[in-house]
Image (cartoon, grey):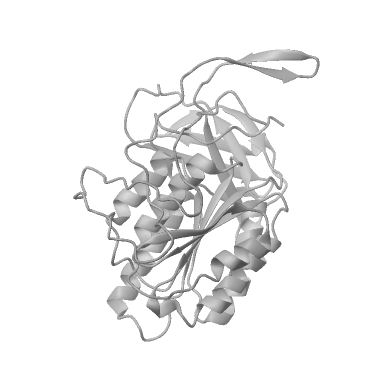
Amino acid sequence: MRHCNDLLLVLFLAAAAAPLCAQQPSSAPAQTPPPLTVDRDPVRSPEGDLPAAAAAPQLHKQGEGYILHTYVEEVVLNATVLDGSKLVPDLKKENFQVYEDGVRQTIISFQHADVPVSIALVVDNSGSMSRKRPAVNKSALDLIEASNPQDEAFVVNFSDEAFIDQDFTSDTNKLREGLSMMESKGGTALYDAVEASADKLASDAKHPKQVLILITDGEDNASSYNLEQTIRRVQSLSGPVIYTIGLLYGDDMTRGEVRSARRALEALSTETGGMAFFPKSIEQIDQIAAEVARDIRNQYMLGYHSTKPTSEPGFRRVTVVAQGSGGKLTARTRTGYYPGTRVGNSAPEQK
């Protein structure tokens, strides 16, 4: 159901073989894209900030009549609730409290159901991944097959550039083909791949609930963006929940490089409400994929209208508190958002 608070975004993003124009944040120097040496064009972030849609009222049919909706900004949060390490599946709206910058907000919409999800599979294709990709590809497909049949996903393979090797589809055979595009060469432009994939989700995804699954075995060494700019971009989009899988075992990296890569992946996940995983061997990735699928399927969606005006700039820090019959629980969601661009594709239905 599309809701009145849906802030429509219009971006011209191409299909699998068309480039997305590169955005350069003000703090990063402008760069010229390298010449293409393959038949595919790299996927890039669009120019500039995403525009908010005009606040025009719309008529929506409901039953035998129509309801007039106007566009107002609603913050939509996906929250995972844990009691220790166990998922908590049976909470109601009254079990939750939401705070923005320390001020309690009124929850106006709530949903807990296995809703369809739009998924970005973003996989490292650098040279060091060549022996790991077959197991990674299998686990990624297992995750998709364990999900809602109405889910859609696209595949981005990245090294020093990011390529959409399969556009949005629910066909696992097409996703398998996209994941099989293994060249395994070049550097690791991880942040650029995350930004471009988040932008594609913002513009092209059918479903309001969005997830980005990032699998890599190293730290970024080729992006035009840095970690802080990447997180800022995702937060300004009110973008996807990011799950990261860091294959950081072995002797290919120094301890300092492992620590740096681990901190970056943890930050991407923590700031967006996801989880970071660091298996000790490739054999553990199947178990991780199953855990990610369970986490995605068991989230709560909470919506509220901020007590602050949209025109007030700056980062809004968000906290979700959940209480069960046994006391306080752990609620994991994104840490906040920037107003004035997009705050969720649409609100969950009121229950």
Question: Which residue: 52% across, 82% down?
Answer: 281
What x and y, as percent, mark residue 85?
A: 61, 62
Q: Residue 13, located in which quarter of the rendered image?
A: top left
**Residue 85 visible within the image:** no
Left or right? Give the position of 158 relative to 57.
left
Furthest toward the front, the residue is 39
Q: Is residue 326 above or below residue 217?
A: above
Q: Nearer the viewer, residue 145 or 300?
A: 145
Q: Residue at x 71, y 48 (%)?
A: 114
Please determine whether, in this image, residue 15 is positioned above or below residue 311: below
Rendering coords of residue 340 (x, y %): 39, 29
Q: Which quarter of the image is occupied by the N terminus? A: top right
Locate residue 74, reporting x and y percent.
52, 28
**Quadrant the C terminus occupies:** top right
How many numbered marks are there?
Answer: 0
Q: At x 34% / y 62%, what residue is drawn? A: 36
Residue furthest to the right in view is 64
Q: Name which quarter of the figure residue 153 lies in.
A: bottom right
